[in-house]
Image (spheres, coloured by chain):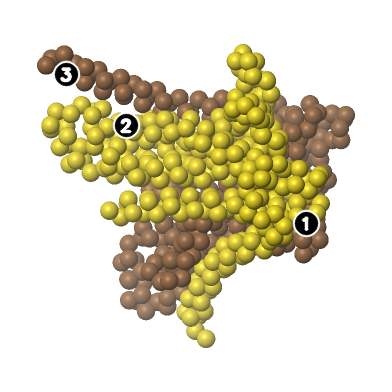
Amino acid sequence: MEARIRIRNTKSILFKGVIVFLAFLITVPLIIVLLYIIKQGVTQVNWHFLTHVPAPVGESGGGISNALLGSFIMVMMSSVLAIPVGMFAGIYLSENPHTKLAYYSGLCVDILQGVPSIVVGIVIYFWLVKPLGTFSAISGSVALAIMMLPIVIRSTEQTLRLLPPSLKEAALSLGVPYHRVILKVIVPCGFAGILSGIMLSIARIIGETAPLLFTAFGNPYLSSSITKPMESLPHLIFTYATSPYDEWHNLAWGASFILLMFVLTLNIITKLITRKWNIQL
Amino acid sequence: MKWETIFRRILIFMSIILVLIVIGILITLIKESIPSIKSLGIGFLWGKVWDPVSNIYGAYPFLIGTLLTSFIALIISIPFSYAVSIYLGEYNPKGWLSNLLKNTIELIAAVPSIIYGFWGLFVLVPIIRTFEAKIGVAPYGIGIFTSSLILAVMIIPYAASLGITLIRMVPSPLKEGAYALGATRFEVIRSVIMPFTRSGLFAGVLLSLGRALGETMAVTMLIGNTSTLAHTFKDLIFGPSNTMASVIANEFTEADHTVYLSALIELGLVLFFVTVVINLIGKRIITRFTNN
């Protein structure tokens, strides 16, 4: 009897040991990747690196200004496209959860969330690149905007659902019209949650490469024209990482470092906001 | 018209746009794959040869490549994501250590896949190459095995974060009852928590699988991009291959005639259907679980 209990207790302790070990082991790859990118990338980054376009093969130096500008422009354009649609659709979903339209758009959000990013690239190729006759920053931005939408919608919807209904009722009972109740009372109250959803979606799309392969394509020169091909950070990393030249690899390490820092900072800020607001995204 | 009505209409209009985007995606994919469906028929899916130069298109090598990478990645990731779910859901649900670990795991999902691919190409591939030389297979370094390893890391957060939430939802009277009967912690986890959360944890695994199937960049950089299937199982696992997503990424801009391009889009259509169905099933299970 004693022995049996001892075996069961040992088993329980051993199991806990295995679980704890495995749970902490998976942080190891992340830490290794982060440290490696920082080690390789931090020495590349200087003022010259940030303000110059990539040098041609065989020349040293050069920078990633074209990719920085391109990523910035495309993220801005896709935010302009996706945030209004996402927020209003999110408001609709939280305000009218039981209509038929809400059911179908909810379903569509779930579908969009699962669509592989490369498929979005293909579709935008036929929607915009082919009709316009050229790869362009516009088509890249539309592809990224579609990737952004589900995150913005879900975060808006869930934040607004958490607000107490008495808020809305109080405002309505004072005779405030419906659109003012939503825009001046409900949205400001859920602002932190909506904002963190937007930041999270930006952090997600700025690292997306696959939808840009056939849309924005890439451009070795500094270009701010939205109807021409445009470089972006992840696309630059992809082309230069798979090239055979060491100087180009160094350029890609530097770009990876900057991309990683940007994404991690956005994520950590979002974490701090959501922790204060206790939002599940 | 009153502002209120306009506002309500804007809300409805934006939701309709959303539905239109999804329908548009579906229609475009189907429309553009028609040339391939017409000329290649259903045999496209199990045609073993992919040779655009001689105009022969078979999706079988990519189906196998996709399934193998995803399932190997899934098998590697499951013990880890279950361990994290149990640790953060049951053993250590509160406190700074728990928060730190949870946030770290969520950061794994935040790192762009291109960075995993780049790191894998320069760090993991040489390691795998030495390993392959030791076990006596052709030391390519790149291939299905390498891609699966990176994929496994990338998909852990999806199953884990869901698992944590679900395990925390197990009602404590159930657990307390088992403890009162003299069960050890391991026995409570095995016979109360696991059966209670089984369907939910399975849904988490499905969501990870959906991610793994559609993942493009990291896999494209690590899989080697060969459209011929190896003959022995060992060569298949450790040798270069191609997935549906990676072949699209590599060949889409080079596809110079209609059927070639259309065959690639048909691959995209298949990928779209499979990931969407897997995701929707996963979500459905979660909704049912959380409502009960």
Q: Which residue is mark 2?
A: B92
- Residue located at (29% from left, 37% from top): B194
Residue A234: image quadrant is top right
Q: Of circles 3 and 1, which is in front? A: 1
Counting other residues with Cα less than 10 Å from the Cα at mark 1, is it few (<14), some (14-19), or many (20 or more)?
A: few
Q: What's the chain of the residue with tag 1?
A: B
Left/right of residue B188 with respect to residue B41 in the rendered view: left
The chain coloured brown carries which letter?
A
- Residue located at (19% from left, 16% from top): A6
Residue A90 lies, in percent from the top left, at 47, 63
Q: Which mark is residue A5?
A: 3
Q: What's the chain of the residue with tag 2?
A: B
Q: Which residue is mark 1?
A: B258
Helix, strand or loop under label 3 = helix
Amino acid at the residue labelled 2: Asn
Q: Of circles 1 and 2, which is in front? A: 1
Residue A259 lies, in percent from the top left, at 64, 39
